[in-house]
Image: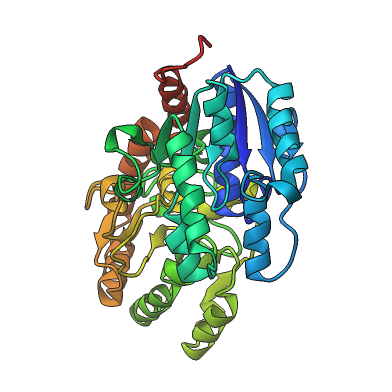
Amino acid sequence: MRIAYICADPGIPVFGQKGGSIHVQEVMRALGRQGARVELFAVRFGGLPAADLADVVQHPLPPVPKGDLAQREAAALAINADLWADLWADLWADLWAELALSGPFDLIYERYSLWSYSAMEFAQTHNIPALLEVNAPLIEEQAQHRGLIDREGAQRAASRAFQAASSLIAVSEEVKQYLTGWVSGDRVQVIANGVNHHRFIKPRGVEPGGVGPGAVSGGRLSTPETPADTFTVGFVGSLKPWHGLSHLVNAFARLQQRVPEARLLIVGDGPGRGALGAELAERQLQSVTRLTGAVPPDQIPDLLARMDVAVAPYPASPNFYFSPLKVVEYMAAGLPVVVSDLGQLRHLVVNNVTGLLRPPGDEVALALALEDLWRSPSRRHSLGRAAQQHILAHHTWDAVAQQIIALAHRQPSACNG
């Protein structure tokens, strides 16, 4: 199967380190492991691909030029040339010609971006199965967090993309509910995010009380940075407001008062780095906290191995639509997790079986859960093992790729492979 993978989002450097970047990379890897030949059409590549993606053919899409927000929105829409035909017809022709001349493709697969619909309409025009992966209600997200001038233009672009796609893939039930305001529910398939178990399924030591290289109770790797007598609480992700890092700092401060050997390991960077540092300083937690900053994806498994428990302390939200990669990766690494009782996390984590669910924003409940896990290495081990087994059975990228290919074959114009 030949697949054209489209990422027209200028905010996602495909070969970068952002969550969206990792998502694109892992889907392409998994499709390749299923025998597909993937070609990438993207606005931003963000550097060189990893060695196992070096053979992916790259087709650059027109970049969105710098400027104020309104100019950038207009430029992004202009790539879909029938809205701005006189100015951008040559780019439209180039994009369609690139897809046509590089084909024939058996499947057009696109990660939905705010202003893009031309790939889906190309597929519809040429009778090619077209799957549109939707990770978030981007119009609402853009308006709330980054600013949106031409909301009507964004809505028109979304409507055209959603209507032209053969099927839509939602990464969570909440995203599916959003999409059913645009299309009928039978056109939307929920396929949650996965994990590259080839990277994350690694030995985590031995049974509690056992002996083995780098092993301590619960299986954490002992290093000079995290000696055996510490209890390390970990977080991985971009440092953004909706990740609940203030709740984590406050809960950890409570924990540290009762468990002086507790340590906090925060992996990642982002716009909240300054505020996070200030909160840690105010709480006098700098000496027991390590902030790694941004790290390459291949270092994440080793950093997870230095944690005893991992958290996703999302604040309360009436529209929690995420399918958090971090939680799947925590669980794949065999870590016990404490996560907010929200949205898809309720489907991913079975309370007291594959992890702990706690009320979002409840810092006391989070601190108590962490203290309970500190007191019981055997419980940490059992939760981590059950979490890993659940992920292996239900949430690998290979399983995601198999569902994508099966869905493509079910489309009316589906290929024969």
Return the x and y of residue 173 as percentages of the image width and height: 30, 46
Return the x and y of residue 233 as percentages of the image width and height: 43, 65
Return the x and y of residue 100 as percentages of the image width and height: 69, 24
Q: Is residue 269 left or right of residue 161?
A: right
- Residue at image point 58% right, 58% down: 223
Q: Is residue 50 left or right of residue 247?
A: right
Q: Viewer-proximal residue, 210 or 132?
A: 132
In which quarter of the view is residue 110 placed?
top right
- Residue at image point 42% right, 20% down: 411
- The image's colour scheme reads rainbow
- Residue at the extreme front of the image, as rendered: 86
Does residue 211 appear anywhere in the picture? no
Q: Viewer-proximal residue, 39 or 96?
A: 96
- Residue at image point 34% right, 80% down: 254
Asked if residue 17 is positioned above or below residue 39 in the image, the reply reads below
Q: Viewer-proximal residue, 299 or 171?
A: 171
